[in-house]
Image: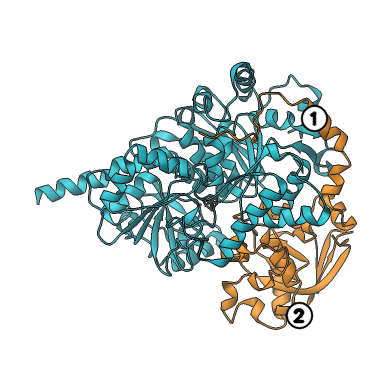
Amino acid sequence: MADTPESTVNPAAPRTLAEKVWQDHVVVPGEGAGEAQTPDLLYIDLHLVHEVTSPQAFEGLRLAGRPVRRPDLTIATEDHNTPTLEIDKPIADPVSAKQIQTLRDNAREFGIRLHSLGDAEQGIVHVVGPQLGLTQPGMTVVCGDSHTSTHGAFGALAFGIGTSEVEHVLATQTLPLKPFKTMAINVEGTLRDGVTAKDIILAVIAKIGTGGGQGYVLEYRGSAIRSLSMDARMTICNMSIEAGARAGMIAPDETTFEYIKDRPHAPQGQDWDAAVRYWSSLPTDEGASFDAEVFLDADALEPFVTWGTNPGQGVSLSDTVPSPEQFDDPNAQAAAQRALEYMDLAPGTPMKDIRVDTVFLGSCTNSRIEDLRTAASIIQGQAKDEDVRMIVVPGSARVRLQAEAEGLDRVFKDFGAEWRFAGCSMCLGMNPDQLAPGERCASTSNRNFEGRQGKGGRTHLVSPVVAAATAIRGTLSSPSDLTAGQSQFQEA
Amino acid sequence: MEPFARHAGIGVPLKQSNVDTDQIIPAVYLKRITRTGFEDALFAGWRKDPDFVLNREPYSSGSVLVAGPDFGTGSSREHAVWALKDYGFKAVLSARFADIFRGNAGKQGLVAAEVDQQDIELIWKELENHPGTEVIVDLQGRTVTCGAVTAGFQLDDYTRWRLMEGLDDIGLTLRTEAEISAFEAARPPFKPATLPARTA
Ligand code: SF4
């Protein structure tokens, strides 16, 4: 990101991870400086496509008589509209069916690889890329979907784009872009039991606000981040967009290399060695400076849950629903007031007293194999609260197969949860998986906007750990509440 | 894309912050595969309320939306911009826009003008006291005028130039085809390709 004269004039100056990846992809540098600077033309290494944001882009190509420049750097999957039950039957909703059929037609016409419903590699676009080994450090990755930030967990510069940009990348494999600023999110310390990557990112968002990351690439750093698995790092980078940032990144390290090695599209032989050498040169240099920095103490973190209708409206699970007067800013006050009405919550209510109707385990935030393992380990041998329905939607068909190979599906089914096929599902309710008006849900997804999971539905964003414990108790809970509850029960 | 120089149209006060893309156009409307015809989808949830500003004359025929801060947060859906344009909006004024929304707007010829919240509030007052007042958006001078209120706005030079010229992005980039090909020839061999397909 050549917005400081030093970094262009002196290539040996210390640089951040984001700056390195950016500079390695500049095809045509922008001209001028500061506000007047024209965009850099950036090369795109991987373009992920799904059925919702692509039809109009393909239509644009057809209208202009343009081909797809690099079908070999493009991959498509069906996820947003796909049903999670009876996937062998025709899709009932004619509009969903048409959108999916359009993607199939476009993929065939333009020569793009597509993983369709029923295929073992089908699934949420952000789960599919990494699991195939297509997402690698130092790449530029784009998709017509804001949660493309997920791929930043590998040290890739990955961000969501609009449909015009999708068309632009299809036609040119490049994007004109202005450099982002950089923000370091330092998370030091050790997470307590039952506290997860989801709690880190929800706490970050509550701290900097839903607009706090605007214009920045966030780089998550520090001992707490280093100790996370790739699945957990993806959860964090995934929700960078909820902090207002377009991209989040984590420096590649042994954990990253280990994850990629031997995946279908991992580099082989000499290429692997060359790749690892390059990847190892990417982490932010000693002495490089960020435009902003934020610090978070991992030791102090508790499970985090949202009470409102934007992802920044969250508190620790042991806290109470805040009252609007607690906010200084009049806009935040009004937003809180409106959120409390929509969520039907009274200030002062302990979060743990909030009863839910539904638990949704899924979405590109928390639907990878580790998320399923974590939730399964908590519910194993426990009984589900009778009035709660729990829906488990693996992020991809591959994750589903893996979970079944490990017997996790049995654990979920024995518990009384619904074991579904892969897709976005109740994360945004474009398929039949929706909340009814007034229905309250503990959801491992990423957005709690009004009506996001179904018209009038009320969403509390939670980690898979909290989702599992909540399904057992029926109210927002963590596993530590379970032990307490049980011992009380035994005493009585 | 139509060149944009100056627009005068009825201002619509939308006195809310954090108007996210799910409110601008709910997800159910994303199922369409066309590029036009999204006017019915704009603020579909809120428009069920008869008191919503777009259900009231003369605001219903407005073409300049004057909104609270953090407009267009949430998803990358460009449909949000299409819906605003299809309804007839030419410009949105807000103290702060979500990045992706602003980018999408610039590409589609919708002016996303960043106006100080103080000025937004003055314009709101003007529009409420005198419904039907026109807001004049002057891209050349980067000013908005509404009744007695005149304010400057922020819009980066590049987006402004393209809006004024009505330039198509892809055509612009394809002028550098030689540079793109040279870049491709120098890409490291270890970079992955999706084809031929390998699966687990
Ligand atoms: S799971 Fe949800 S957030 Fe992720 S891509 Fe699908 S709809 Fe978007």
Label 2 amino acid? Gly
Q: Residue at image x 81%, y 40%?
A: A34
Looking at the image, the residue that sits furthest to the bottom is B57
Return the residue nearer the eye: A146 or B30: B30
Residue A268 sits above or below residue A212 on the image? above
Residue tagged 1: B183
Q: Which x, y percent locates residue B163?
A: 85, 56
Q: Quadrant of residue B13?
A: bottom right
Q: Which mark is residue B132?
A: 2
Label 1 amino acid? Phe
Chain painted cyan = A
Quarter holding the N terminus of chain B is: bottom right
Colour chosen for chain B: orange
**In the figure, is residue A98 to the left or right of B6?**
left
Residue A149 sits above or below residue A88 on the image? above
Q: Residue at image x 33%, y 45%?
A: A409
Secondary element type, mark 1: helix
**Labels 2, 1: front one:** 1
Chain ID, mark 1: B
Secondary element type, mark 2: loop
